Amino acid sequence: MRPFEYSPLPSRVIFGSGTLTRLDELLGELGATRAIVLSTPGRRDLALKVAAQIGARCVGIFDGAVMHTPIETTLQALERVTALGADIVIAIGGGSTIGLGKAIALRTDLPQIAIPTTYSGSEATPILGETVARKKTTQRSPKVQPEVILYDVELTLALPYALSVTSGFNAIAHAVEALYARNGNPVVDFLAERGIAAFATALPALQKDPGDRTARAEAQFGGWACGVCLGSTDMALHHKLCHILGGAFNLPHAEMHTILLPHALAYNAAAAPDAMMRISRALGTADPVAGLVRLLDRLGAPRALKDIGMPSDGIDLAAKLAVENSYPNPEPLTEIGLRGLLARAFDGQPPAAA
Ligand code: NAD
């Protein structure tokens, strides 16, 4: 066995159906009596439902969470946290809402209960991405790791199919990059392979029936497993490109991850044989890149950056930015190589080796 180091991430994780009913009990165990419930504007109904459920333990809601955690939103939410005298943050929603909870926890050290409703996996990481003056920066801090993650499969039944697919591929991307991370280890390898396999089974089942609880539960487990991979290792080319494109062109997060994944995989394939072997096994295919493309097409996933708002004159800028700061990646990064990758992803062409 290769020598390795692994620090388990300290969260209590609860899976099941109907687990939301345990919220009051969990608050009691944490000694919390003044919860603030966070949501996006579109999921205000859910925040109100949670607030009603915990009754006197809730002091108010904040339903202004938006993607990429802009500092302006965090400051507004912090004002509300202070005014209400909240002693715990409950974030119910996807990565946008959970990101806001983390941003509050970073500044107040309040405990958090994350109740995820997508598969993107932010709840499982000590990572916070924030946007200040349109620039997104990412940091790691134990302060932002939610104390409790409450997965309730019932909350994902209404997750639209298209979002299920893209947030599922967002999760798969965490696992893929963890498999070739410089600080990977056998625990992460196991979770990554299991997480990818979970989505390879669950997403086709959800295409047939979005109300399939077994598939929903499998996807939820996959989201957590892949999130732990993200939280435990350093990401490479794929996440770096997404960070650049998200920051420069404000492209939708999960769709961008989905589109770029087969291209990043093809770029790194020759330099990461062990990771490719594990991805092949998880997808049940001999060729991981071709297998991933087949799965994307079968699921009707987005394939071209031009379709999600990327400007064609952004390719050169993004390739330049991607090689400007060095970061570890299995295949050496070249501006010309990345320009080719981005051009293919822009048009939705098949991925190619570096
Ligand atoms: P999201 O939270 O942005 O949600 C997308 C939309 O779907 C929102 O309008 C939301 O209200 C809606 N929605 C969420 N769950 C739903 C449900 N069950 N039914 C119906 N509608 C639902 O989506 P996301 O992809 O989970 O999060 C993206 C954000 O998370 C980005 O800002 C990204 O940077 C961040 N993220 C962070 C990490 C991390 O570790 N820090 C990891 C992954 C993603």
Image (spheres, helix red, strand yellow):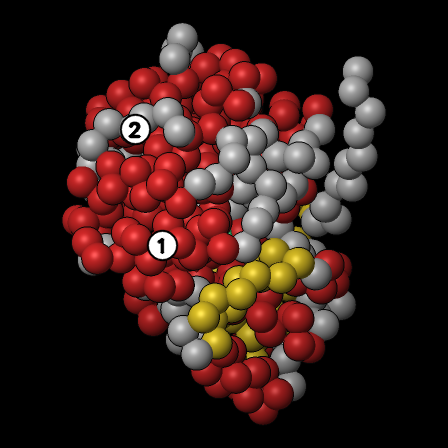
Residue 285 picture quarter: top left
The residue lying toward the viewer, choosing from 331 and 250, is: 331
Disc 1 or 2, which lies upstream in sequence?
A: 1
Please indicate, yes or no, whether residue 265 appears anywhere in the rendered image.
Answer: yes
User: Which dot marks residue 351?
Assistant: 2
| Amino acid tagged 1 | Ala
Residue tagged 1: 318
- Residue at the top extreme, as displayed: 286
Residue 24 picture quarter: bottom right
SS for callout 1 = helix
| Amino acid tagged 2 | Pro
- Residue at the bottom extreme, as displayed: 83
Residue drawn at (58%, 47%), measured in percent from left and top? 327
Question: Where is residue 22 shown, x and y percent of the image?
Answer: 60, 52
The residue lying toward the viewer, choosing from 183 and 227, is: 183
Question: Where is residue 146 shown, x and y percent of the image?
Answer: 65, 57
User: Which dot marks residue 258?
Assistant: none
Residue drawn at (40%, 29%), measured in percent from left and top? 354
In the image, is residue 287 above or below residue 308? above
Question: Where is residue 85 shown, x and y percent of the image?
Answer: 64, 86
- CA neighbours of label 2 inside 10 A, class few (<14), some (14 to 19), many (20+): many
In the image, is residue 4 above or below residue 59? above
Residue drawn at (53%, 23%), measured in percent from left and top? 271
Residue 284 picture quarter: top left
